[in-house]
Amino acid sequence: MDDEGINISVLIEILSETYNLFVATDGATALEIANSEHIDLILLDIVMPEMDGYEVASKLQEGEKTSTTPFIFLTAKNDSQSVVKGFQAGAVDYISKPFSKEELLARVQTHLKIHNLNSELVENKNFLQSVLDYSPHAVISTDLNGTITLFNKAAQKLLGYAAD
């Protein structure tokens, strides 16, 4: 998301050979795209008319579909207060304009890899949880403080307690 045509043209030139891109020139359009398409990573400018990048970030974090979508602020605002505010808003990275093509590509690739690995980890966790839930053997696990972290259905049936 960027409202400057030249910035969008540069990003398209750099990224379109490797990635499928969606372009938004305002926050409302960016949110509409993020909620209707499968988006793996968002590049987000801060200085925008009507809805700035921080507000878009907040709405992304609140969205059911978009809350886990990583975003990188790509902006001319490079003072430390803006950078900190960007990370506090949930950004996975912060790139200052002007940027180098190589740095942009490396950061995008890195964050896509991290996002994909996180997605695989969640899938594997959910699969293993379903296996444990339907195992005929009671499984209970606790952390070092004695808090129950795993309590499958067989353990619930055996002990007569619900997981919560």
Image (spheres, grey):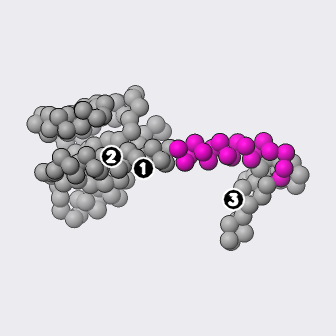
Q: Secondary structure at mark 3?
A: strand
From the viewer's perspective, is 136 left or right of 55? right
Among numbered discs 3 and 2, the one appearing first in the sequence: 2
Furthest-bottom residue in this view: 145
From the viewer's perspective, is 145 left or right of 23? right
From the viewer's perspective, is 152 left or right of 61? right
The CA span between labels 1 and 2 is 9 Å
Spot occupied by residue 141 in the image (x, y as percentages of width and height): 74, 60
Quickly name the residue at label 1: 114
The CA span between labels 3 and 2 is 34 Å
- In the rendered structure, find residue 109 and report the number of the disc placed on it: 2
Spot occupied by residue 162 in the image (x, y as percentages of width and height): 79, 51
Compared with 53, 89 (above or below) is: below
Mark 1: which amino acid? Ile
- Contact (Cβ within 8 Å) of mark 1 with mark 2: no
Mark 3: which amino acid? Thr
Image point (29%, 50%), residue name: 107
Compared with 85, 134 (above or below) is: above
Quickly name the residue at label 3: 149
The residue range painted magenta reads: 120-138
